[in-house]
Image (cartoon, rainbow, N blue to C red):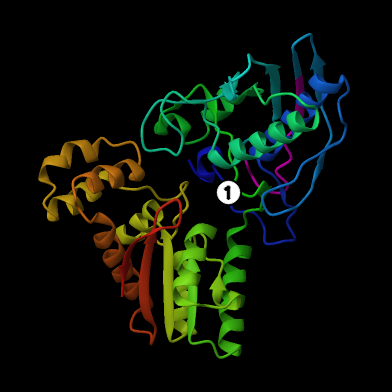
Amino acid sequence: MDAGENEIRVEKPATALRRGWTTGACATAATKAALTALLTGDFPDPVEITLPRGEQPSFALARENIGANHAMAGIIKDAGDDPDVTHGALVMARVRRLPEASGIVFKAGAGVGTVTKAGLPVSVGEPAINPVPRQMMTQVVTALCDEHGVTPDIEIEISIENGAELALQTWNPRLGIIGGLSVLGTTGIVHPFSCSAWIHSIHRGIDVARAEGLAHVLGATGSTSEKTAQAFHGLPDIACLDMGDFAGGLLKYLRAHPVPRLTIAGGFAKLTKLAQGALDLHSGRSQVDMEWLASQAEALGGNHLKDRIQTANTALEVLEMTQSQGLDLPAAIAARARATALETLRGAPVEVDVMVTDRAGALLAHAE
């Protein structure tokens, strides 16, 4: 799952935009407040958590309840100026003690979806709570239980008020996430989404790189692929342009303001869209074409996979399917993504290489 599953966004004015907090951050704060109350009898309000990058925001409680063996806390999600459908939603965590050796168990409450199809980072049958929020909640529970001398055998049930209705405005039903929203986030912070402001920042990054005399810049779809490509090429931070989904904004500006070399890095799904010819890679404005992917696999000898690929749920499912058959689909995607980039540059003096990474940052393909 990625951020697009809970967010169908629209362009906002290029003004100073206020950042907000992800559903995962709100769920983590609610979990901490509820478990603290279960262990001590008192709810911390506000409750402070530590995000993956070290920020320590505080959250006011909107709801609280405590019983003999359970406690619940709720937080209103503030997405800042991002047009997220979950802005203003009540995110609740209910915790209860489990028998010893049960471990930490996640449960989907009302308004949180359940995964029913393969190809997502959470297994089929599991609550649609992404890996980073799970990790954040696990760290909170482990720390609190250690502090109070109890074993971390806790059930965490996350609910989102009206989540089932809100999910109908997202891609979740199409992806087989049934019954509600996904609990998302990798940094805990929602950065406001303004197309013009984001593209403007890409342009300014290119301007700075040119002013510094850099001969090589990097545009990545996300932080994981950026780290891999930056380390591979030994690039300084100033060479890293925050491309995100705006491959077109990056390439068109480089066409008029060239830098000798450009590396584009991203995950398999995002770069599949670029390979198809899409220049805006956001999930709300471009989709992976499974028939097109099937044709690429067929060219590699994967005729027998055609029907399975065309009915696949996600690009990740297609990747795993073809890898199991020994088909190097990422190499084909990298080459075609590079071709799209070169076509968009229209002969500008920019050498291009494309790197495809997996979710953990491992390099799957490199087209030079």
- Which quarter shows the C terminus? bottom left
Magenta: predominant secondary structure element?
A: loop
134 relative to 272, above or below: above
Query: Few, some or many C-alpha atoms within 10 Å of disc 1 (few <14, some 14-19, many ≥20)?
Result: few
Residue 73 in percent (x, y) is at: 77, 24
Residue found farthest to the top:
68
Residue 222 in percent (x, y) is at: 51, 58
Horizontal placement of 224 versus 42: left or right?
left
Residue 125 in percent (x, y) is at: 44, 23
Looking at the picture, tell me which residue is in the foreground, 69 or 316: 69
Residue 222 visible in the current orientation = no
For the residue marked with disc 1, what is the amino acid?
Answer: Val
224 relative to 283, above or below: below
Q: For numbered disc 1, what is the local secondary structure?
A: loop
The magenta segment is 72-84
Looking at the picture, tell me which residue is in the foreground, 113 or 289: 113
The image quadrant that residue 273 belongs to is bottom left
